[in-house]
Amino acid sequence: MWQEAELPAGFRLDFRESTGSTNDDVREAARTGASAGLVVVAERQQAGRGRRGAAWICPPGEGLAFSVLLRPSEPKSLWPRLSLAAGLAVAEGLDRHGVAAEVKWPNDVWIGGKKIAGILVEAGEDFVTVGIGINVGVTNFPEMLAASATSLALECGDAPELPLVLASVLERLPVWEAKIGADFDELLRRFRERCALTGKQIRLTCADGVLAGEAAGIGDGGELLIRTPEGIRRIVQAEEIRLAE
Ligand code: BTN
């Protein structure tokens, strides 16, 4: 399946049946001089990881796990915006397979309030690794995830081939990567249109502790706005954000 995979121009595939974490593979390649556009895809990850140190586990063949090497030309201070860019790219890529995906700030992708994809962006000295895990053919989630996770197979009744899903996401990634600088307004506009949290009651943990309130949108710097009884707070970094029950 992967031998014949066709990637959009500018990307090259390194497929591995088994690895620790594709993010680590890309980081190693970057440190030894690999150029932007390297895509490491793994059938199995022994140590796949998510944000906040969580494990990322997906049955082989049913999940798409890959990492992309970027060497952004924009100043490093703008690289955090790549989280939003990657979220949009995944949401738009998934839409091509017949769903209506939303972005959950900063960079999960949801359908109908359930997570279909997670993104782990890690910056090195002169490169960025964008790691993406997408539930494609998963139909049986472990009990603890069943209420909060979904997949293309569950949403569409059919799972597209993994290389097709990969290509759809990669087609959109350079579009949004190019907009973390001068065209950030456009990126923000599209992110706001797809934001799953806006208008919802949420609870999050940040440096100041637990905050609860209404998600009031995305600020001009890409931060999450939350309306609390004390007023609007601007959240740049947060631990798990949940919809309030
Ligand atoms: C999250 O939801 O917290 C982010 C999950 C990111 C998982 C992907 S799978 C490919 C890449 N390699 C990893 O070890 N993690 C990312």
Image (cartoon, rainbow, N blue to C red):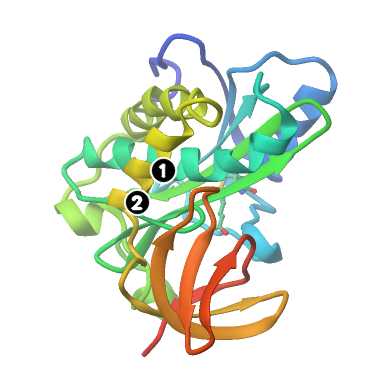
Mark 2, other Cα within 10 Å: few <14 / some 14–19 / many ≥20 = some
- Give the residue type at disc 1: Leu
Mark 1, other Cα within 10 Å: few <14 / some 14–19 / many ≥20 = many
> How many numbered marks have been drawn onto this rendered protein structure?
2
Residue sitting at the far top = 9
SS of the residue under disc 2: helix
Residue 141 in the image: above or below residue 219: below
| Percent x, y of residue 173 | 45, 28
SS of the residue under disc 1: helix
- Distance in Å between CA atoms under marks 1 and 2: 6 Å
Quadrant position of residue 168: top left
Residue 199 in the image: above or below residue 139: below
Image quadrant where one finds the C terminus:
bottom left
Residue at numbered disc 1: 188
Give whichever of 233, 215 is nearer the camera. 233
On residue 192, which mark appears?
2
| Percent x, y of residue 179 | 48, 27
State if disc 2 and disc 1 touch (CB < 8 Å): yes
Question: In the image, is 144 to the left or to the right of 110?
Answer: right
Question: In the image, is 158 to the left or to the right of 7?
Answer: left
On residue 125, which mark appears?
none
Question: In the image, is 136 to the left or to the right of 41?
Answer: left
Task: Say if residue 166 shows up in the picture.
Answer: yes
Quadrant position of residue 103: bottom left
| Percent x, y of residue 161 | 30, 34
